[in-house]
Image: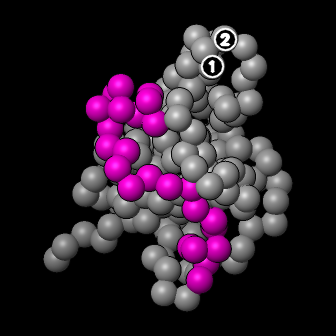
Amino acid sequence: MKPEILNVLFLCTRNSARSVMAEVILNTIGRPKFNAFSAGSRPAGSVNSLALALLEKNRLPTAGLRSKDWSEFSAPGSPHMHFVFTVCDQAAAEPCPVWPGQPMTAHWGVHDPAAVQGSEEEKRKAFLKAYTELHRRISLFINLPFSTLSKLALQQKLDEIGRTQ
């Protein structure tokens, strides 16, 4: 029997940097067990150029990436999500759509690198810090012993990962 692929949705208000980076990271290191998506409550309309540059520098795929509205994933016929993670504090505070199938949720807040003011180098460092934090959390997530954890234990682990720096 083929194991179930677990769908994960990363949410951030603008869906232009953190959530997109998380989507790409999980789709790269989590295959074939995971399938990741990203969306936002008020999408920017494009992916941040510094996020794209960082992903490309790390030899991660960027073709087809776009800023998406989260309504795409709550509509009939959308992929069933097993997990929904907010990666920005603003999205975590917003009323989210009702996700079909009642996926497990957690808040994995990461500082917004796109909000950093300063030199290009300071901005690139902020993006690298966000990318590193997301990569660390996603690495912990994909290595959880899903088959041996109760739903409550899994939720506790997800919350712990959200507190990981």
Q: Could you say where residue 90 lies in the image, as x and y percent from the top left?
A: 80, 48
Give the magenta range: 52-75
Task: Classify 10 Å Cα crowding around label 2: few (below 14), some (14-19), many (20 and above).
Answer: few
Residue occupied by mark 2: 119
Q: CA distance from mark 2 to mark 1?
A: 6 Å
Q: Position of residue 128 (x, y in %)?
A: 52, 22
Seen at 29% across and 32% down, the residue is: 59
Residue 33 seen by the camera? yes
Q: Residue at x 36, y 32 (%)?
A: 56
Q: Position of residue 165 (x, y in %)?
A: 60, 26
Q: Horizontal placement of 111 versus 90: left or right?
A: left
Q: Quadrant of residue 53?
A: top left
For disc 1, the marked residue is 123
> Is label 2 in contact with label 1 (beta carbons under 8 Å)?
yes
Residue at 67% in and 57% down: 43
As helix, strand or loop, the secondary structure at mark 2 comes to: loop
